Image (cartoon, grey):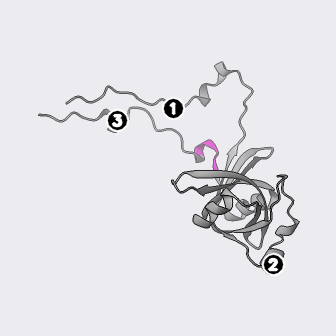
Amino acid sequence: MVAAVNPYLKRTDPAPPSPAALGVEELTTSECWRYVQAGEMGRLAIATDEGRPEVFPIDYRVHDGAVYLRSAPGTKLRLMAQHPAVAFEIDGADARAYWSVVVQADAKRLDTDADIEASGILGLVSSSPTSKDNYVRLSPVAITGRRFPRRDRSRASGDRHDDKPWPIPHFEPLHK
């Protein structure tokens, strides 16, 4: 019996352009921190007991190389206590580009008045109307970001030839 050749292992189309060739830039650590320090609201991703991420919008403040947030009692605090490895993300746009920054961090609830006062978190006003009397420090482990050039989105769909995705080849299933 001769084994059939898997057609998916044979590349039939040219390789798509690299992200760098399309103008995608990796941000430096300094650039990432500038974006994070200038922001006010982001998203906090925490693993659940089932291993799925739960995402929460949060107001935050940056102080001494850490990200601080306020929280009401509930799911977010419980999950952070059980799964302190979190991801914090912000994104935005300026006149020339869109950008996104992700901070991988360890979350820890602040327990002493001295730590809370030193963090500057007491001055953070939450967008949520609920009382936020728990204070959390996200101690960064890694920070990464990317910037994407703005594209003209005003063209008619018939003129979007260069925006079309690369085709995915399809072959008949292998038969034995």
Residue drawn at (54%, 51%) of the image? 52
Nearer-the-camera pick, 38 or 167? 38
**Res. 166 mark:** 1
User: Could you tell me which secondary element the residue under label 3 belongs to?
Assistant: helix
Q: Check disc 2 and give the amino acid type.
A: Asp
The C terminus appears in which quarter of the rendering?
A: top left
User: Could you tell me which secondary element the residue under label 1 belongs to?
Assistant: loop
* Distance from Cα at disc 3 to Cα at disc 1: 15 Å
- The quarter of the picture where residue 131 lies is bottom right
Residue drawn at (26%, 30%) of the image? 174
**In the rendered structure, which disc, 3 or 2, sits on the residue that comes first in sequence?**
3
Q: Residues within 10 Å of mark 3 (few under 14, many from 20)?
A: few
The residue at the far left in this view is: 1
Q: Are marks 3 and 1 in contact (CB under 8 Å)?
A: no
Horizontally, is 90 left or right of 116 in the view?
Answer: left
Tell me residue 65's x, y (percent): 73, 71
From which residue to which does the magenta span run?
21-25
**Res. 56 mark:** none
- The quarter of the picture where residue 163 lies is top right
